[in-house]
Amino acid sequence: MKIINQPINGCEEIIDISSPHSALVNFYSAFNKQNYQLMEKNWLHTTEVTMSNPLGGIKRGWNEIKGVYQKIFSGQATVYVEFYDYSIHSTDSMFLAVGRERGMLTTKNKQIELAIRTTRIYVKHDNIWKQIHHHGSIENPELLEIYQTTVLEKLQ
């Protein structure tokens, strides 16, 4: 297994649009630029997709997942993350990316450094990589509470 330490933040040049790396670059570009249209293109739009993230709960189906991104992107908190210390495990029609995210949650009153364990699963759909699952966990209980309180208070 090859561990990749070169971070992905969405600003990387995409050399091969059919590679798993390009799907990850597109995701982090969408997230860090708060670009809902690009985010929408990154996910498969079915009831089969799932997301378990630090904001709590499991979201099932694209309709539930898109609501999370819409709230994050329209809130007063800005979240920036980059993916690093990761490995990619793939077949011809599926890949799994397992690693870490680091970043920053910023509001007008505070900055919080983030550390998240992350897994993303993609499948090939019409010859394009589409995300079908995301799981993110914040290990530090105090950081998790601060993150949830800050983002959720801004989403109300």
Image (tube, helix red, strand yellow):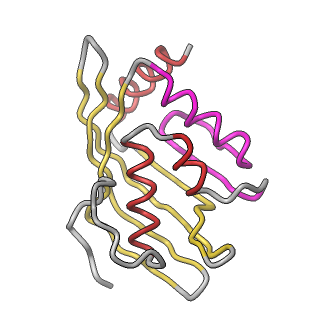
Q: Farthest residue toward the bottom? A: 92
For the residue pair 151 and 125, the one nearer the viewer reads as: 125
Residue drawn at (31%, 30%), measured in percent from left and top?
A: 105
Magenta stretch encompasses residue 106 = no
Left or right, 69 with reference to 31: right
State the image quarter where residue 104 is shown.
Answer: top left
Q: Residue at x 64, y 42 (%)?
A: 65
Q: Where, quadrant-wise, is the N terminus in this rendering?
A: bottom left
* Residue drawn at (55%, 37%) of the image: 69
Drawn side of residue 75 relative to residue 108, left or right: right
The quarter of the rendered structure image containing the C terminus is top right
Q: Nearer the viewer, residue 4 or 144?
A: 4
Identify the magenta region. Answer: 48-75
Q: Position of residue 83 (x, y in %)?
A: 32, 57
Q: Is residue 123 above or below residue 30?
A: below
Please tell me which residue is depicted at 28% across the width and 55% down the height of the picture: 11
Would you place residue 29 above or below residue 2 in this image?
Answer: above
**Image check: 41 left or right of 150?**
right
View extreme (right): residue = 47
In this rendering, the answer to whether 58 lies above or below 153 is below
- Residue 77: x and y in percent read 38, 22
Q: Position of residue 98 (x, y in %)?
A: 41, 66
Q: Is residue 154 above or below residue 114?
A: above
Residue 51 is one of the magenta-drawn residues = yes
Determine the image quadrant of residue 130.
bottom right
From the top left corner, tell me how far across and down residue 40 is, in percent: 60, 49
* Count of number-bearing discs: 0
